[in-house]
Image (spheres, rainbow, N blue to C red):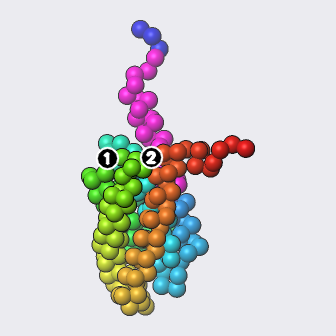
Amino acid sequence: MTGTASPLPRTASALFARTLGLAVVIGLCAWWSIAYTRGVLGFSSLWVASGVLCGFLLTSPRREWAPQLLGAFAAFLAVNFLLNGLTALGVTLSFLNTLEAWLVAAIVASRINDVSDLTQIKSSSAVALVATLLACTVSGLIASVAGSVHVSTPAPFAVLMRTWVASHVLGMGIFGTLTIAACVEGLKILGQPG
């Protein structure tokens, strides 16, 4: 018997490493959005993390989504805990951020076989736009209700809703697309050497 390990532990350890790396990136993106783009209402004006998570999911095998979603949820919880303490609102928003990215990725993946195929760019863009608007509206409705209930001096529901949806649609559009490009192209995204 040789000393080679079976492929299963290497696959599991690779998935663990990717999931841990994703959680760190999601945590940093969430922290940046909360720390640097938080408006007077408490919601960020540009939400980067859900777009990054969605782009990463769309370039990963679906069998890896569950651990990646759990890692991202843990990262969202950790950032909310560090910046705002452990609150019902923080847990709710962490769940919604994860749900939103999953919903967009699930809708797009069910209708588009290869998100990197430029010959499908029109249909990919249309599906992604509809999925993003739907997911951000659903999460925005719940987040706005939660924000109205759990904050001592809540802003008007419509203002919370508009802020959430705008920041999440913007972040999903920019950073979801950028993440897909980075995952597909790797370092080539930076251009040709020299």
Mark 2 or mark 1, whichever is nearer to me: 1
Looking at the image, the residue that sits furthest to the front is: 119
In the rendered image of this protein, does residue 163 appear above or below residue 18?
below
Query: Badge 1: few (under 14), some or many (20 or more) residues near its Cα, within 10 Å?
Result: few
Residue under the point 44% across and 21% down: 5
Dividing the picture into quadrants, the one containing residue 162 is bottom left
Residue 5 sits inside the magenta stretch: yes
Q: CA distance from mark 2 to mark 1?
A: 23 Å
The residue identified by callout 1 is 113
The boundaries of the magenta stretch are: 4-27
Q: In what quadrant of the picture does the C terminus appear?
A: top right
Image position of 80 with respect to 189: above or below: below
Image position, residue 46 (x, y; %): 51, 72
> Is 170 in front, or is 72?
170
Query: Residue placed farthest to the right in the image?
Result: 194
Q: Nearer the viewer, residue 87 or 61?
A: 61
Q: Are marks 2 and 1 in contact (CB under 8 Å)?
A: no
- The residue located at (32%, 81%) in the rendering is 145
Q: Amino acid at mark 1?
A: Asn
User: Which label is found at residue 156?
Assistant: none
What secondary structure do most residues of the magenta stretch adopt?
helix
Residue 134 percent across, percent down from the top left:
30, 70
Is residue 68 visible in the rendered image? The answer is no
Residue 26 painted magenta: yes
Q: Residues within 10 Å of mark 2 (few under 14, many from 20)?
A: many
| For marks 2 and 1 on the same chain, the one whose residue lies earlier in the sequence | 2
Compared with 89, 179 (above or below) is above
Look at mark 2 in the image and give the residue it sits on: 19
